[in-house]
Amino acid sequence: MNLDMNQLRAFVTVAELKSFSKASQKLCRVQSAVSQQIQKLEGSLGSDLFIRGGRSLELTAHGDSMLAYAVKILEVNDQAVAKLTDKSYAGVVRVGSSDTYASSYFSEIIKCCSDRFPDIEIEVHCGYSSELWRSYEAGGLDVVLTQGCPARIPSELLHSEPLTWVSARESLIFEKEPIPLALFTKGCGDRDLILSALNRVGKPYRISYHSTSHSGIVAALSSGCYVSAVLLSTVGEEFRILGEAEGFPVIGNLDISLAYRDKSKTSLAGLFADISRSYFQSLSTVNFIYSTEKTQTN
């Protein structure tokens, strides 16, 4: 019998964090995949590694013994791979994304990168999609995660999520006509989608506030003086979700595309792309449940 490195890594991570959900975040895998790896390892060893059913996750006697071996095995494995393949994974990877995506999604992605490849330096450039794609084509960025990818640039769809109308929870500003809007400045794809939806149904509006940052839009919404549309996953408890019942039209989805040129196994861009891809795959598996629960609470 040979021990599987991925199963051992999942086991050690769960044992150290005492949580399947936290381990799945660190490993950038869905929780069910991590659980399956643990079950396969237990099946190979013929014994349970965790005591299940209690309030806290604890190791069995076999699990406690296995942990010491697993840590040593992974340490030797990682040292051998780094030494023999000369993969130090050090250097700078330049990543382009929107301010909204970076503030909403990058925390877990960057944490995974830091945990797995601590010598990588991540340089994040935020801006509107048209600017980022131009910079990528000019060689100024190694990886781009944003919307509106031109057809001429090879990319993959990473994530799709609806833009949702919101206002401050205690405010009735959404009843006002024309609707006072807080939008990103011209050049932002979100702005064009929002205005197109309003014009399509003939709903009167006036653009009363402009910002180049996600935090600027959130501040405007929090004032209770404006309505805007943001990604559903960024809607906090302090906001009210508005829909067709309140007279607001469906806007549509924002599609986040991923593009990077260097597809070699040792490229920093490829490593960042792989971690990003895993994160968004995990996010998509819970997105429907998450969106439904959030809509119902509003």
Image: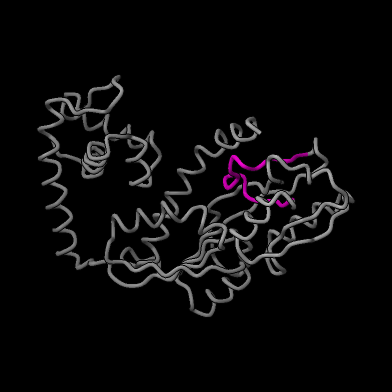
- Residue located at (68% from left, 52% from top): 223
Residue 231 point in image, percent of width and height: 62, 49
Residue toward you, 46 or 109: 109
Return the residue found at the far top.
Answer: 53
77 left or right, relative to 175? left
Q: Magenta residues, as a range?
A: 227-243
- Residue located at (52% from left, 74% from top): 136
- Residue located at (89% from left, 51% from top): 202
**The N terminus - image quarter:** top left
Quarter of the image for residue 250 reads top right
Quarter of the image for residue 273 reads bottom left
Q: Is residue 256 magenta?
A: no
Residue 214 point in image, percent of width and height: 60, 59
Coloring scheme of the render? Answer: one colour
Residue 46 point in image, percent of width and height: 16, 24
Residue 124 point in image, percent of width and height: 46, 68
**The C terminus - image quarter:** top right
- Residue located at (16% from left, 39% from top): 3
